[in-house]
Amino acid sequence: MSIILVFIVAPGLGIKVFEQGLSFVEFSLLVLSTLFIAIGGYIINDVFDIYADSVNKDDAESPVGNSISIETANVFYWVFTLLGIMMGVLLSYLVNQINFGLIFLFSAGLLWFYSQKYQCQPLIGNIVVAFLSALSFGLVWLFEFYALSNNAEVFVVVQSNFSFVNRLVIIYMSFAFMVSLLREIVKDMEDYQGDNRFGCKTFAVKYGIAASKVLALIIAYMSLVASLVVQYTFYKAEFYLLVGAFFPIDLLFISVVLLLHSSSIKSNFNKLSTLIKFLMLVGILSMIIFYFEA
């Protein structure tokens, strides 16, 4: 979240970070709120997944039920989630958009229903996780926009740059959505054994590994084409450093595609999952390049 504010939104608008939009305190509330709600989501997911994780993960990877009791995990879930929601509501109040507090309540609710129900339904759980990943990028721009709107003088000066920043944020939100969705599909293939044993009807369990591979390949090919289109857009805008920054992303998408074609066992899918995480990291770090183009 810090990266998109410092290296995309602020330079795209031509403003100084923490001086003309969100203050340091307001941005800290946004980061902590998002982080705490995400931590709560991970905890409750481990609680609901305790049996499947006993097959899919090592004990070290799944502390709930091992080093941490279910009762303690539930307490941690409520503490982190409620703190996250309250911080989000406070932030919404500070930018004079108290109704935005519902975004944090909605996100926490989605994570609860994902863990309890959606993750064991074909594609629905995958889309929920991908949506929330993309939302974390969009929230920075949303709250920065309304923080700026409270300063009429600055707002008038920078509003000509809004459409440009919108396009950049949408590009990275789309990237986060597609890569997260791809990883979720691969993760379902990786966790097939435990999900199948305990009746979790993911896409891989319901339609099989072969169908999941086809779906993952479609998403990967679409993402690769989208990456090339974005590169061409940057080229037309004469953002040559960003064009270069997307070459590693293209190569990683190609690597994912090639590995997907040859994958058939859990160890292969584990490597794919790690590769996709690295792809996400490289995509996020590419935002830094824009700072030197602006």
Image: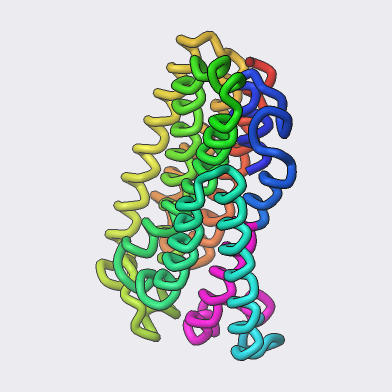
Residue 17 drawn at (x, y percent): 71, 30
**Residue 284 visible in this rendered orientation of the protein:** yes
Q: Quadrant of the N terminus?
A: top right
Residue 283 drawn at (x, y percent): 57, 37
Q: Residue at x 51, y 39 (%)?
A: 142
Q: Residue at x 61, y 66 (%)?
A: 39
**Residue 279 visible in this rendered orientation of the protein:** no
Q: Residue at x 42, y 45 (%)?
A: 178
Residue 147 image-quadrant placement? top right
Does residue 28 lie above or below 234 as drawn? below
Q: Nearer the viewer, residue 151 or 25?
A: 151
Does residue 43 lie above or below 129 as drawn? below
Q: Quadrant of the C terminus?
A: top right
Instruction: From the image, give the main secondary structure of the stretch colored magenta.
Output: helix
Q: In the drawing, does residue 250 fall left or right of residue 123?
A: right
Does residue 241 lie above or below 116 as drawn? above
Instruction: Write down the region rendered in magenta.
Output: 33-62
